[in-house]
Image: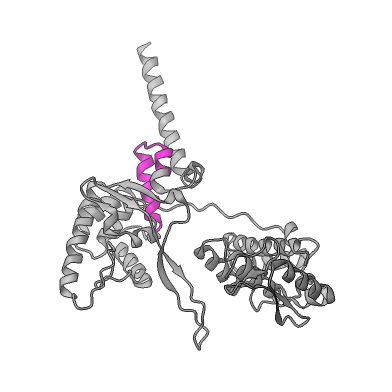
C-alpha cells in the first residue's frame, strides 16, 4: 500500500499510480473514489462527505471506528507485536459489546466510565483496564482530529493506575540448588542461562549460536521470538498464531551480556545435546542456528515448555515463579552484589535507569538498610574507641 496523505486518513497511492480514498454511506458500507492526483481524490472525497456528513457519522458504530482506526491508521506506525496486542484488546473487550455497538457520536464520558467500572467489577485488573483505555483514548483522539467528533469523551474518565508489580525471585540457595542438582534436566540450560543473563523469554528462545562467543565469553542479545496472530479465522472462529524472530522493542534491548562460568557450562551442555539430536533426527532436523529448540530444531512449543518449567520447579521444591521472574532474579543477584543500577539497567536492556529503579525499589530499600546498619556499627566502634 502506498504512502498516506498526512491528516487524510484513508487516502493513499495505489501501486498502479492512482490515488484512492475510502468513505462510508449511511449504512456504513465502504465505497471508494479514485483520481490521477491526490488533490483530485481529496476534492471527490470532500464532496461525498459534504453530501450527508451527519448520516455518515451517525452510521459508524464505536467498534467499527476502533477497528478502522487500528487497521488503517495505527498499523503502519507501530511494531507488529504492539498492533497485535491492540487488536487482541479490541476483539476481546470491544467487539460485539454493548458499548461497541453504540453509534460513535453517541458515546459519552458516563458510558465509558461505567464500561471501565464494569470491567473492574468483572475481575479484570487495573493494568488490563488501563490498556483498554489507551486504545479507546487514541481512537477517539483521532476521531476528533478528523472532525468526526467535537471532543474526546474518554478524556475525562477515571481509570485506576496500574499497580506496581512486585517481582518474585528465587533465593540464592534455590539458584544454587538448581546448579548443583538439576544438570540432567532437559530444560536446565535455558533456565540457568536466563537466571545468569536476565534475558526475556522471547530473547532466550530467539538466541542463535552465531551470537554466542565462547572464546570471549559473551552473549549478544539481538532478537526476540514474538507471537503474531493470524489474519484469518478457521471454521470455529479461531485465529492461528505463528511465531517470528523480530528485533526487540527498543534499541537498548540489543545488548551484550558477559558469560558467567555457570552459563558457559550450561551452553556447552546444550550444544552437546543438540549435536546428538541432529544425528538422531538427521532426516527431519531443521537447523535454524537456534540455541534452544525442540529435538527437531524447531522453536520450543510455548505451552508445553511452560508446563515443563513449572514441573521442574515443583520437582526441586523451588518457589513456583513466572519464567519472567528468572530475569528479576538475575537483577536481584546483581543488586545484592552491589552492582550499580546503571550497569543493571544496561545488562537488562531497560530503556532508562528509572525503569530499573521502579521495578527493584524493594531490593534498593534493603540495601539502604544494610548500609545504615554498617554505619551504625561503625559509629558504635568509634564511640568505644573514644
| The residue stretch that appears in magenta | 324-345
The correct choice, above or below, for 302 with respect to 31 in the image is above
Q: Which corner quadrant holds the N terminus?
A: bottom right
The answer to whether residue 44 is seen in the rendering is: yes
Name the image quarter holding residue 90: bottom right
In this rendering, position of residue 380 left or right of residue 70: left
Which is nearer the eye, 120 or 82? 82
Residue at 36% x, 15% y is 384
Residue 63 relative to residue 215: left or right: right
Residue at x-position 59% and y-position 68%? 2
Structure colour scheme: one colour
> Residue 190 is drawn in which quadrant?
bottom left
Does 335 lie within the magenta span? Answer: yes
Residue lying at the far bottom of the rendered structure: 235
Residue at the spot 51% in from the left edge and 87% down from the top edge: 236
**Which of the two residues, 273 or 187, is positioned nearer the viewer here?**
273
Rendering coords of residue 275 (x, y %): 17, 66
Q: Is residue 267 above or below residue 53?
A: above
Identity of the residue drawn at 31% across and 62% down = 313
Residue 122 is at least partly visible in this image: no
Q: Position of residue 202 (x, y in %)?
A: 39, 61
Main SS of residues in magenta: helix
Q: Position of residue 135 (x, y in %)?
A: 63, 64
Most foreground residue, 316 or 324: 324
Q: Residue furthest top?
A: 386
Looking at the image, residue 105 sits to the left or right of residue 71; the answer is: right
Q: Quadrant of residue 23?
A: bottom right
Q: Is residue 17 magenta?
A: no
Amino acid at each position: 500500500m502506498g504512502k498516506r496523505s498526512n491528516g487524510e486518513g484513508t487516502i493513499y497511492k495505489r501501486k498502479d499510480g492512482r490515488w484512492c480514498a475510502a468513505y462510508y454511506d449511511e449504512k456504513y458500507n465502504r465505497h471508494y473514489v479514485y483520481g490521477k492526483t491526490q488533490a483530485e481524490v481529496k476534492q471527490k472525497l470532500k464532496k461525498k462527505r459534504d453530501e450527508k456528513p451527519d448520516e455518515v457519522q451517525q452510521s459508524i458504530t464505536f467498534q467499527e471506528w476502533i477497528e478502522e482506526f487500528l487497521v488503517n491508521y495505527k498499523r503502519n506506525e507501530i511494531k507488529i507485536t504492539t498492533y497485535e496486542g491492540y487488536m487482541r484488546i479490541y476483539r476481546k473487550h470491544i467487539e460485539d459489546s454493548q458499548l461497541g455497538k453504540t453509534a460513535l457520536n453517541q458515546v459519552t464520558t458516563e458510558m465509558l466510565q461505567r464500561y471501565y467500572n464494569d470491567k473492574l467489577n468483572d475481575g479484570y485488573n487495573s493494568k488490563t483496564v488501563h490498556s483498554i483505555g489507551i486504545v479507546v483514548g487514541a481512537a477517539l483522539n483521532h476521531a476528533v482530529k478528523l472532525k468526526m467528533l467535537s471532543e474526546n469523551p474518554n478524556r475525562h474518565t477515571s481509570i485506576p493506575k496500574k499497580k506496581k508489580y512486585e517481582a518474585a525471585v528465587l533465593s540464592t540457595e534455590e539458584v544454587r540448588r538448581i546448579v548443583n542438582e538439576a544438570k540432567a534436566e532437559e530444560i536446565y540450560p535455558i533456565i540457568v542461562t536466563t537466571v545468569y543473563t536476565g534475558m526475556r523469554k522471547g530473547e532466550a528462545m530467539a538466541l542463535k549460536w552465531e551470537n554466542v562467543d565462547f572464546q570471549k565469553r559473551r552473549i549478544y542479545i539481538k532478537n526476540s521470538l514474538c507471537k503474531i496472530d493470524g489474519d484469518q479465522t478457521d471454521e470455529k472462529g479461531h485465529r492461528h498464531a505463528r511465531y517470528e524472530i523480530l528485533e526487540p522493542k527498543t534499541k537498548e534491548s540489543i545488548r551484550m551480556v558477559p558469560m558467567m562460568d555457570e552459563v558457559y557450562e550450561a551452553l556447552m551442555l546444550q550444544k552437546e545435546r543438540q549435536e546428538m539430536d541432529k544425528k538422531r533426527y538427521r532426516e527431519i532436523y531443521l537447523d535454524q542456528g537456534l540455541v534452544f529448540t525442540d529435538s527437531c530444531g524447531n522453536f520450543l512449543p510455548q505451552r508445553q515448555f511452560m508446563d515443563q518449567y513449572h514441573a521442574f520447579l515443583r520437582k526441586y521444591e523451588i518457589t513456583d515463579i513466572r519464567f519472567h521472574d528468572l530475569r528479576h532474579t538475575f537483577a536481584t543477584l546483581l543488586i545484592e552484589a552491589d552492582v550499580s543500577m546503571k550497569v543493571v539497567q544496561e545488562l537488562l536492556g531497560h530503556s532508562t535507569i528509572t525503569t530499573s529503579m521502579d521495578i527493584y525499589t524493594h531490593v534498593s530499600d534493603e540495601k539502604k538498610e544494610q548500609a545504615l546498619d554498617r554505619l551504625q556499627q561503625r559509629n558504635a566502634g568509634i564511640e568505644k574507641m573514644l
